[in-house]
Amino acid sequence: MGRSSKDKRDIYYRLAKEEGWRARSAFKLLQLDQEFNLFTGVRRAVDLCAAPGSWSQVLSRKLRSEKRNEEERKEEVKIVAVDLQAMAPLPGVTQIQGDITKVSTAQEIVRHFAGRPADLVVCDGAPDVTGLHDVDEYIQAQLLLAALNITTHVLKPGGTFVAKIFRGKDVTLLYSQLRVFFSEVTCAKPRSSRNSSIEAFAVCQNYSPPQGYAPNMSNPLLDHSYDVDFNQLEGPNRIIVPFLACGDLSAYDSDQTYPLQLDASQEYRYTPPPPASHPATLSASLSSAQDQPTGQRRLPPTGSRRLPPTGSRR
Ligand code: SAM
């Protein structure tokens, strides 16, 4: 039985049709709101990866439907929806067609919120699945991190970020990364999200970036052209990775050339290099070289080299 016929039997699919939602996903955001009160006091929101637009519909209906000072309130509400694909217009929703992993798209979103940050950012982004689970999980994680980076530019302190997350093996790492920016992070699974699906939603509340953190559009995750001088970064924005040199000064230097130190008890015999045209020939030649007596090898075995005493090496 095909997937579409299964969808048609699905209760949320039918409810979405009845209630006029563009996709059954609308219920995921509605159920997340039931649990976390996502929309209370929200006037400015961003919907990343929004097409066909059911989450934007939810935002539009919920944020614009409050009764008090209706006209004034409608004026004040700002919703920006972004997707690779175009979608049909929605009342009160500004659309941007673009890739959220691109700096140019991120900058366009930021422009819409210049001076007045958003209260809520949601991202239901999902890449086209390849069927290779590890690859799909990795791409999903990169999409979430791209969304997080945009969020750090537009979200107000104390604001909320909701993003689709795959409950794969990297979920703990992503959780820790989100916890750097939000004091509360919950992985939630709405009833309308199928149990058979690996998807869940990270509900990140109380945006509180590290002291001194400066959002940076030139994040290498977003763009491979590093157009920022990393030496200019300061405080928590600049991490200098320490390297530890191991081994004492009497150990061999791998950049030096040392004279061959052969076993004096054996006569030296030259062995010509093996023809290395084919990898199989090469590995066969190498293994036969290993079988030769010590004196015939081109490289002395470890035991015959004069190495520094073991105790002085790490
Ligand atoms: N929340 C939407 C709704 O309720 O209608 C459904 C979103 S759909 C599951 C996932 C969307 O992510 C697709 O429309 C896809 O085009 C979008 N997407 C995937 N990668 C993207 C990217 N790099 N930039 C922008 N949108 C992306």
Image (cartoon, rainbow, N blue to C red):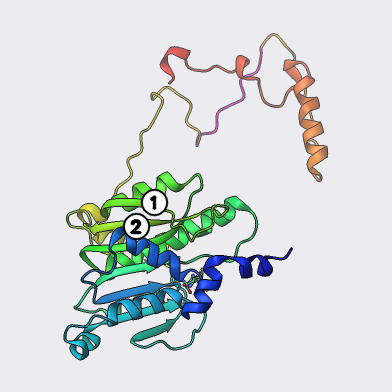
Disc 2 target residue: 203
Residue 7 % position (x, y): 62, 67
- The answer to which of 67 and 293 lies nearer the viewer is 67
Disc 1 target residue: 187
Residue 45 % position (x, y): 30, 74
Picture quadrant of residue 26 = bottom left
Which residue is at a point 34% across and 57% down the rendered structure image? 203
Q: What's under tag 2, amino acid-wise?
A: Val
User: Bounds of the magenta span?
Assistant: 255-263
The CA distance from mark 2 to mark 1 is 6 Å
Picture quadrant of residue 153 = bottom left
Mark 1 crowdedness (10 Å alpha carbons): few <14, some 14-19, many ≥20: some
Q: Let me know if residue 260 is in the magenta part.
A: yes
Q: Main secondary structure of the magenta part?
A: loop
Residue 78 % position (x, y): 28, 82
Element on which disc 2 rests? strand
Which residue is at a point 41% across and 87% down the rendered structure image? 90
- Could one spot residue 104 in this view of the protein? no
Residue 82 % position (x, y): 42, 77
The answer to whether marks 2 and 1 mark residues whose Cβ atoms lie closer than 8 Å is: yes
Q: What's under tag 1, amino acid-wise?
A: Cys
